[in-house]
Image (cartoon, rainbow, N blue to C red):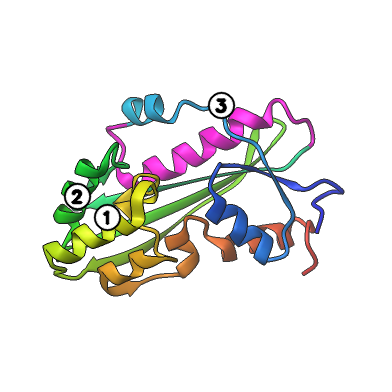
Amino acid sequence: MAVNNSPLILASASKTRLSVLTKAGIAAEVLKPSADEAALQDQWQHLLPRSLAIELAKAKALSISGTQPGRLILGADQSLDLDGSVLHKARNTSEAREKLRALRGRTHQLHSALAMARDGQIMFSHVSTATLTMRQFSDAFLEDYLAQSGAEALSAVGCYFYEGPGIQLFETVEGDVFTILGLPLLPLLAFLRQQSIILS
């Protein structure tokens, strides 16, 4: 479906987020945000993980909004919160192994944020949290998982894709699946209905 006769612009290179929107019947065009995520993470390292996710989502939406007059821009980001500290993406397999060992047998939170912008202004923002506990998996399982996951393990916070083999890492999960996938869909749909962008 079109949003104001134009597809929503998704300011994210995440194939998972695009799939979530598409399956929900929301047409979206993908534009890579120009915000320097690494620099912003350094600048905002004092923020709590939940606040960091929402500020990054806003920055991504605003980085595109000024160049797309009248278009609705969706920015999204996710932070992994382990005892109040942010765990970032691994740069290589060795780091992925270390991060997964740090998460093994422990509980962490995923904070998934979204921000909607139009004409350089934030119209709406939201953050949802899911709580996940990894099981005490064996070293043999870990090595097999890393071998199967390959580069995918390096492209997600926590080094796992919940919608794939990563589900085998977990013992318990509390929270909305869309939060875990990185896009709180129900609050987004509620906003779009409230704005009469989709039918209520």
Task: Choose mark 1 or mark 3, whichever is in front.
Answer: 1
Residue 173 placement (x, y as % from top left): 32, 72
Up-down: is 66 above or below 30? Answer: above
Q: Residue at (38%, 54%) from the top-left corner? A: 111
Amino acid type, label 3: Ser
Amino acid type, label 2: Arg
Q: Earlier in the sequence, mark 1 or mark 3?
A: 3
Q: Earlier in the sequence, mark 2 or mark 1?
A: 2
Callout 3 secondary element: loop
Q: Estimate how packed mark 2 is, as few (under 14), some (14 to 19) or many (20 or more) residues with alpha carbons within 10 Å.
A: some
Residue picked out by circle 3:
34
Instruction: Find residue 146 and name its label.
Output: 1
Residue picked out by circle 2:
97
Q: Earlier in the sequence, mark 3 or mark 2?
A: 3
Amino acid type, label 1: Leu
Drawn side of residue 73 relative to residue 179, left or right: right
- Which quarter of the picture shows residue 106? bottom left
Q: Estimate how packed mark 1 is, as few (under 14), some (14 to 19) or many (20 or more) residues with alpha carbons within 10 Å.
A: many
Callout 2 secondary element: helix
Which residue range is magenta in the image? 45-70
How many numbered callouts? 3
- Distance between mark 2 and mark 1 Cα atoms: 8 Å
